Image (spheres, rainbow, N blue to C red):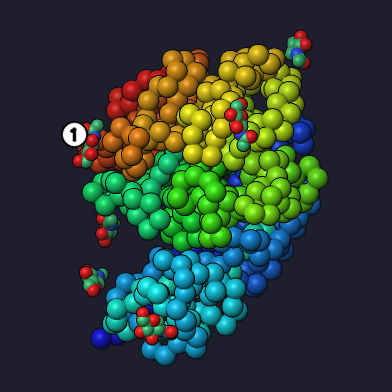
Amino acid sequence: MLLLIGVLIGHSGSVCAWDLRVAKALGSRGDDEALARVSVISTSAEEEAGAIRMLAEEAVGPLYSGRFRYKWRAAFDLGTPNASCGKAYAAWNGSAPEDDECSLACADDSECGAYAFKRPTCQLFRACELEAGDWEVHQKLGDNRVTTTIVRLPALGIAKPPKHPKGVVIGDPCFSSRFMTCAFGEAWDTFNRTILMLNALAPDVDFFAFVGDLFYDRDGTLTRAVWDRLTPEFKRRIVVVVPGNYDFWAGGGPPGDAFDQYAWGFAQFYAQDTLASREFPFLDFDFDDDAVLKHPVRNLVFYHNIGDLGFLGYSGGPANETVDRIDWEEPCAFFNRTAPRAVFLLGHWSDASLGCDAQADTPAVRAMLSTLDGCRDIIYFDGHMHCNEIQEPDYGFNVGGHGMLPHGCSQYGFALVDSTSTRVAIDYFEERNNQTDRFDDIYDCVTRHQNRGGVANCRHFAAPWR
Ligand SMILES: *[C@@H]1O[C@H](CO)[C@@H](O)[C@H](O)[C@H]1NC(C)=O
Ligand SMILES: *[C@@H]1O[C@H](CO)[C@@H](O)[C@H](O)[C@H]1NC(C)=O
Ligand SMILES: *[C@@H]1O[C@H](CO)[C@@H](O)[C@H](O)[C@H]1NC(C)=O
Ligand SMILES: *[C@@H]1O[C@H](CO)[C@@H](O)[C@H](O)[C@H]1NC(C)=O
Ligand SMILES: *[C@@H]1O[C@H](CO)[C@@H](O)[C@H](O)[C@H]1NC(C)=O
Ligand SMILES: *[C@@H]1O[C@H](CO)[C@@H](O)[C@H](O)[C@H]1NC(C)=O
């Protein structure tokens, strides 16, 4: 039997197919509300050249383009189980229990078009017509590349955010148990549902914030599977993203191993405008610590306004100096000067555990910041604990319930931040829990009101959090 090779969508090269990221520009670039970092993730030299041409025309800052460095260097599909490719051009028995070694070897070999792994054997292929077999075969979609610069919105079909924006916040989304058990992945159909809901929400919200542990992904395959299914409209929205412990270590905590991504794949794929961009065209690619490829702290910290809302994102891991080395007065002085209606601290860790030391978790950083002008009333979102709940009344919200169970509450849902009314409202939409499945109702409501306010018309399904 011959199985057809699955070709993923999103690589056709038409303008709509650009894998865009939009992030607000770092606050220190000035108060210009229209500045944004726009990036294209591509998988071939031709696509990258097109992205460079397109972004260079709009650039008002330095342009960086290159193959992903250190981690997630190539893009693979999710894999076809029980398949084979005929004769391999290279094969060996490795020592890693999973396919990590094999996928890295294929990533770094320009001749490799697919790899197959059956413990302990790795096979590399130049090209591959799948046949029935008893291997798991991953097709290489190309090398991951990022092209990124600063533009002034509106540009490239991306709108300037409105004065009173709306946004959706989620944390710890999972669908696959490839690296970590996703308790509700299959039972709650989270792959389909997360993608359906994000795409349905996009026309009526201005930003999406993700507070870490994004798809529990070590090698980039899971992340790509999601982003290849997000619509061009979703990708023209601002994304605000901070890493969690699983974005550093697939096992959840330090010290990790050679196959962990230490948030390097993450930082390139989600392309935020961080403190590092003050001295570098994009990120600082030097390590703080060779043993664990530790990011310079400035690669994972940013602050900016989206309309009349302020955002400060940081990483609580790894280790204390993350927090000690940040000049917290700078973002707070920016907020003090620009006076947004509300300022949000985005962190991942809800407590000091698994790579996050005492005083570096989100509630602790919030408490420390609340002594500084500009940050006194800062509101935090975090994840880590897999619940969706008010963590501290009025200013602390956990949104870690999106498929995971351990340390959790068996919830799946998202928070809506809305600055359009007389106050900055936060509402929580529970799509699913052990007892009740409201996904279809919420999804129907959101799609029925699409381009006419969307989810803001569906508050009867939500719990008011603030
Ligand atoms: C692949 O084969 C295994 C047994 O070797 C079987 O358990 C599994 O269901 C098969 N998967 C698919 C997708 O056919
Ligand atoms: C790998 O080891 C298995 C036994 O575990 C052996 O059958 C196989 O031939 C070896 N393959 C290679 C490529 O060395
Ligand atoms: C997602 O939806 C597709 C198409 O309806 C279906 O084939 C697939 O089984 C669903 N995925 C899961 C995990 O249920
Ligand atoms: C971080 O600080 C805490 C207490 O403030 C201390 O117990 C811990 O050892 C420190 N960790 C590192 C890695 O320095
Ligand atoms: C914050 O702003 C207020 C009023 O605009 C000003 O009085 C105060 O000095 C500022 N604080 C800092 C730390 O700049
Ligand atoms: C939800 O169901 C899972 C699996 O049956 C169970 O382990 C978990 O404790 C339940 N959670 C709640 C809050 O009842």
Residue 107 percent coordinates (x, y): 56, 71
Q: Depth check: 246 or 37 in front?
A: 246
Which residue in the rendered view is the most extreme toward the left?
A: 435
Residue 414 makes an appearance in the image: no
- Report x, y in % for residue 400: 41, 35
Nearer to me, 243 or 253: 253
The quadrant of the image that shows the C terminus is top left
Which structural element holds mark 1? loop
**What residue lies at 48% left-to-right and 21% top-to-bottom?**
396
Establish if 142 lies above or below 423. Answer: below
Q: Is residue 427 above or below residue 149?
A: above
Quadrant where the N terminus lies? bottom left
Kind of residue at disc 1: Gln
> Which sits in the foreground, 315 or 304?
315
- Badge count: 1
Taking the image in four quarters, ligand 4 sits in the one at: top right
- Label 1 environment density (alpha carbons within 10 Å; few <14, some 14–19, many ≥20): few
Q: Does the closest atom of ligand 6 sit within 8 Å of the Cβ of label 1?
A: yes
Query: Whole-percent x and y of residue 385?
Result: 40, 33
Residue 185 horizontal side relative to residue 166, left or right: left
Q: Residue 299: x percent and y percent?
A: 68, 44
In the depicted structure, whether residue 439 falls above or below residue 195: above
Q: Is residue 358 found left or right of 195 in the rendered image?
A: right
The answer to whether one can see residue 122 in this image is yes
**Which residue is under mark 1?**
435
* Residue occupying image coordinates x 62% and y 16%: 370
Q: Residue at x 38, y 69 (%)?
A: 79
Choose top left, top right, bottom left or bottom right for residue 35: top right
Q: Residue at left 70%, top 26%? A: 328
